[in-house]
Amino acid sequence: MEAALDAPVVTHEPKATSRQTVVLSVPTIVCGNCIRSVENTLRTLRGVEAARANLTTKRVSVVVDPELSSTVDLTTALERAGYPSALLADDAETEQKARVSELVPRVGVAGFAAANIMLLSVSVWSGQASDMDSSVRELFHWLSALIALPAVGYAGQPFFRSAIAALKSRRLNMDVPISLGVLLATGMSLFQTMRNSDQIYFDAAVTLLFFLLIGRALDERLGPKARGAAENLLGLRAKNATLLESDQTTKVISAAKLKPGMIIAVAAGERVAGDGEIISGQSEIDESLISGETRPRAVSAGDSVYAGTVNCGGALRVRITAAEENTLLSEIGRMMLNAEQSRGRYVRLADRASQIYAPAVHVLGLITFIAWMVIGAPWDQSLTHAIAVLIITCPCALALAVPAVQVAAMSRLFSKGVIVKAPDGLERLAEIDCVVFDKTGTLTTGELRLGTSGSIDTVALARAGSIAGASRHPYAQALVKAAREQGIRAPTVDDVQEVAGSGLITTSAGVEEKVGSAAWVGAGDGQASIWYGAAGKPPVGFDFVDEPRKDASACVSELQRSGYMVSVLSGDRRDAVEQTAVACGIEGWAAEVRPDQKLQTIEALKAQGYKTLMVGDGLNDAPALATGHASLSPASAIDIAQNAADAVFQGELLQPVIETLAIAKAARSLALQNFAIAIVYNSVFVPLAMLGYVTPLIAALAMSGSSIMVTANALRLRSMKLHLPMIGTSQ
């Protein structure tokens, strides 16, 4: 691989902004038209820069300028538009349970009423083949009316309230045709009962409500399974904190009241309530939530801790540096929510298709009624067919097709330690055919480890480690760590001087000792990473290497077997890059590459038709990360690299790269399947309803079934056994 040498360096400068993202719960979102109405309502407000609603999560993410708009303004505007809303609740589970608890008794009433009305209807149908007296038949019809009317009035309230709110704000949602269909069927049946006619549909109207309510209740129960990752993450925040007062007394306060500068006590087994710095105490912190590392990290005074992590050892005192919405945990949660709410190409397609459905439903229903009347059908029969069309032409399946898959994919990726930030990141990740890795900190651990080739002079290592403890230089710290790993106790030497650019020097018992470069120590042009020398003794060199991640070779092999072109772009020296590339089985590599050269290499690959995934962690990788078709960055990367990347993965392994590509491909496949389900459903059932082959009861079953089907299909992603398929194929 050859890199171009004359490209300009790309710089990224963060923009100062006061924007913040507010997430609102809008439980009355029921269709694609609701999404459009909510978004358009919010976008017209002063200070609102962007709004994105999600049908699956029933959430809307709003980017606002807090100086120009407030949460009250947002909720008031949505209330006027017929969408009651509230700031995302801390206890989302309680919110969801409340909605389910409202639906369940209505399902029971509708089911009980439908069963009893059906018994009466069966009796009437049986009597039509015999000599049932007309007065008995009329009595049964009136009994059905007495059961149906209060049942419809109670069980239909969720649909009626939503429809009324929509009409008051001069808009349409899918609860409007549903309510219209139920009320028309009930009203027509009551009128026919008064006429002692046989065309009675109380059973159909109530049974219709029964199945619609079942569908909505199942959707509410399935929703949290599909969307739970971000909310579950935020639910791991500590609710309370033990505040340490100036007089050394303590009191328990809500974590929401913590401010930077406050000091809290964290007992063993407790979650840390905010980001902060340890001022006293020693312990081990379980940071698997943040870093993906399962092994607890030893901490002491001066170390940083993060909200949501668990104190596994002794008591700690922590000075808060960030609290509540400003913690790293909250930031990760917002990234997850943003990813779940994000709008990719397939999402935009589904939204546009569902938006035209609401007016189309009423047009098709009217056309059906008029057409049947024109060909000579009775008005009640024509109205029955129109009612079936009103019910069956709901675009819920189409509106849920992509968001349900997207949320399920985000949840599974999060469980694997991957956070997708870009709106269309999953779609682009599914199209990748070339993977370019940075070396240091990406293919490798980024940690200097003592080379194991040859024998180690433990005496020299002990003295070098003792002297190196006085410096914060990476090689000095690597020496200290190496001594500790060898089981050598290396107490820090006090009287050590650091010579900039050379190394460390000290005198002990009249003997001068040095730790530093070969020339400084007197080793000539020795090739070791760092040297130790003492007067009268030959210098001893210690060679440190940046080892590949444990699974780097296996990860590269799997990518290559699946048809991906894999290469390395690194700014490190040639021998180090070649060594790592050979160890990982990568033939294409380039060393001593500047940031502008990395960018030009990615652009050259793009010109050749490749869709490149850039994986990097450093400042020099940021331009390439931003230029690649898609990009990944480890959690250890600097902020600018993470900001430029489409997704961030945690942990010490490269396996998340494989899993991300596999899940992205599976998500694309499931999204296309859901599109097919929605298209087949509408292509089959809508014409059948217009031709009179679908009753209102069958329409209710079909509409609810299609929504449940696409959601259940999306949820398969949570448990599918995935592998990385060959390029150009799906799972």
Image: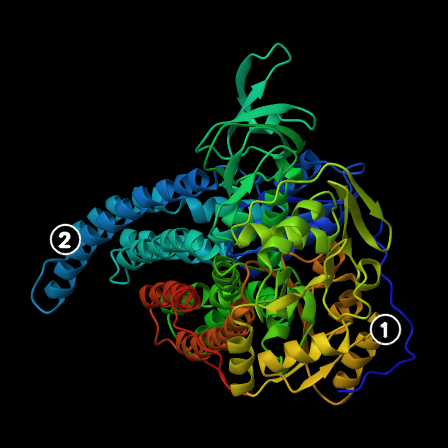
Mark 2 / mark 1, whichever is N-terminal: 2
Q: Nearer the viewer, mark 2 or mark 1?
A: 1
Task: Identify the residue at horizontal 10%, vertical 58% (top origin).
Answer: 133
**Residue under label 2:** 135
Q: Return the residue nearer the eye: 692 or 571.
A: 571
Q: Looking at this view, is 157 or 196 the one in front?
A: 157
Look at the image and tell me whether residue 399 can be seen: yes
Residue 439 location, x and y as percent?
68, 71
Task: Quarter of the image for the C terminus: give it.
Answer: bottom left
Left or right of 357 in this view: 149: left
Residue 496 in the image: state x and y as whole percent. Answer: 77, 41
Q: Amino acid at mark 2?
A: Ser
Can you give x and y, in whole percent of width and height, for residue 630 in the image? 67, 72
Given residues 519 and 281, the one toward you in this image is 519
Image quadrant where residue 457 sits: bottom right
Residue at figure coordinates x 62%, y 57% from the top left: 635
Quadrant (top left, top right, bottom left, bottom right) of the N terminus: bottom right
Which residue is at the far top?
A: 247
Question: Residue reaching furthest left?
Answer: 131
Residue at the spot of label 1: 596
The image quarter containing residue 188 is: bottom left
Give the x, y percent position of residue 113: 24, 48
Query: Circle 1 — which element?
Result: helix
Density class for disc 2 (Cα within 10 Å; few <14, some 14-19, many ≥20) is few
CA distance separating discs 2 and 1: 91 Å
Task: Mark 2 and mark 1 in contact? Answer it, CB < 8 Å.
Answer: no
